[in-house]
Amino acid sequence: MSTPAPQTLRSLYRSLLRELPPRTTPLSHTLRSTFAASSSSSTTSTSTTTSSSSAKTELQKVQEAEQLALYLKAQRTYVTLVERYNPGMNMNEEERVRLTARRVGMDLPVDYAKE
């Protein structure tokens, strides 16, 4: 088993960052330091021989990170679809009733607030 190429690690790192919130978080700092350590160890391991167990754990970490990237992408897609096809989910009851009435061609009477 060989260690993953630096291009693969860079691609995986970018795909994980794409799925995280745009602001800088402690998680993004942790990811950066982990991937920096992984890429530096993979470049040094090409010149020196490593044991198969350390290469296996490195490959397992990369596979887990790929699975995490796929999971985060699926979650983002799921949230987008739920918001698109359930538009009244985040509305209060009054707004939902008003929009339902408009859907069938009715307008609710205007409530005047006491001033």
Image (cartoon, rainbow, N blue to C red):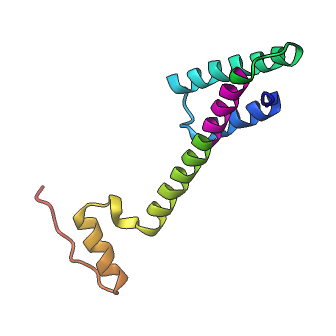
Q: Say which residue appears at 68% left-offset and 23% top-offset.
A: 35
Q: Quadrant of the N terminus?
A: top right
Residue 74, compared with residue 111, is above or below; it is: above
What is the x, y in percent for residue 14? 69, 35
Is residue 36 found left or right of 43 in the rendered image?
A: left
The span shown in magenta is 54-66
Residue farthest bottom in this picture? 105
Viewer-nearest residue: 11 or 87: 11
Is residue 21 found left or right of 87 in the rendered image?
A: right
Residue farthest front in this picture? 52
Can residue 25 be seen in this snapshot? no
Q: Quadrant of residue 9?
A: top right
Q: Quadrant of residue 82?
A: bottom left
What is the x, y in percent for residue 73? 58, 49
Q: How many marks?
A: 0
Viewer-nearest residue: 9 or 105: 9
Q: Main secondary structure of the magenta part?
A: helix
Residue farthest right in this picture? 47
Is residue 66 found left or right of 77 in the rendered image?
A: right
Asked if residue 86 lies in the magenta stretch, the reply is no
Q: Say which residue appears at 85% left-offset and 12% top-offset.
A: 48
Viewer-nearest residue: 90 or 38: 38
Q: Say which residue appears at 40% left-offset and 66% top-offset.
A: 87
Is residue 80 found left or right of 38 in the rendered image?
A: left
What is the x, y in percent for residue 18? 63, 40
Q: Say which residue appears at 57% left-offset and 21% top-offset.
A: 30
Q: Quadrant of the C terminus?
A: bottom left
Can residue 50 be seen in this snapshot? yes
Viewer-nearest residue: 42 or 52: 52
